[in-house]
Amino acid sequence: MKLIPLALALGLLVFAPLLMTLVLGLFSFDGLAAPQWLGWAAYQRMLDDALFQQSLRNSLLIAALSIPLRLLLALGLSLLLQRPGRASRAALLISLLPVVVPTLVWATAWLWLLNPHFGPIAAALDNWRVNGASWLLSAEGARSSLILILGVLAGELLLILVVARRQIPQAWYDLAALEGVSRLGQFRLISLPLMAPIIALLAARDFAMTFQTSFIPAQIVTKGGPQFMSTMLPQYVYENSFEYLRFGYAATLSSAMLAITLVVLVPQALLLWRWLKRDDNPA
């Protein structure tokens, strides 16, 4: 009985809007005229949309490059934090700062850093004989900027990996040290294999999260340009919904984004369930 309010809240806040989005995706609706039934033709229209294909490629590319960067940064910092000191405390503070700062503030700060007139990163690019003034005006520069902005958001991953590392018995590392195994060897033989399931789950979770967190940086820093080469899928959903009043088509795009997310998360959830079940029954 105690779970009934929770189930009702979950249904009203999650499953009801989800069902309405899936249904609305089968209609053409602009909020002014009556909805027109399209059925599966709505998804065919989406598949034939060149801008949808471009935004999907952009989202997958930026996720594929920013997630490994974020994981490597968090993993490296988690190893640094094993040694207490000023360096580890400074690394923890710097890595957690982007997590607690609102995303809008974070994206605006990067817009200042990349500003072609007075931004320090643009000035540094000019010193490296790279045209910083046109960095955001090129497809490679705009995409690289989004990868960098998303790739350094490693604070939350860092905390999880630090906790996962501390669950490994210290005696194993002491025994490896007695056998003459270097710190790098200890990481390769002990830490990495035992933390691999956690890293894989974090990568899958970050794939779904990147679809959401990429919206504000893309909207603030690159505006989806140039020529839609940095337009992200959630940004394209937003434009169709609130700028073009294509609510039905935006729902179709949202359904596709949900399907892509499930393709990644469902296998990971099954693997996690098997992993937990194996730990509960070691025999």
Image (cartoon, helix red, strand yellow):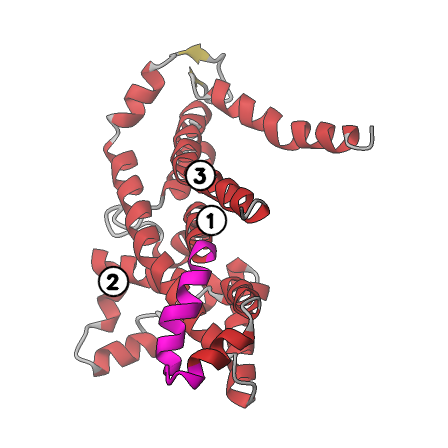
Residue, far bottom: 86
Dot 3: element:
helix
Tell me: residue 188, above or below residue 59: below
Range drawn in magenta: 177-198
Q: Image quarter for residue 85?
A: bottom right
For residue 238, the mark is 3
**Residue bearing mark 1:** 205
Question: Quick check: is 195 in the magenta stretch?
Answer: yes
Q: Name which residue type carries label 1.
A: Arg
| Majority SS type along the magenta span | helix
- In this view of the protein, can residue 229 be seen by the observer? yes
For residue 141, the mark is 2
Q: Position of residue 139 (x, y in %)?
A: 22, 55
Dot 2: element:
helix
Q: Nearer the viewer, mark 2 or mark 1?
A: 1
Q: Position of residue 203 (x, y in %)?
A: 41, 53
Sequence-first disc among 1 and 3: 1
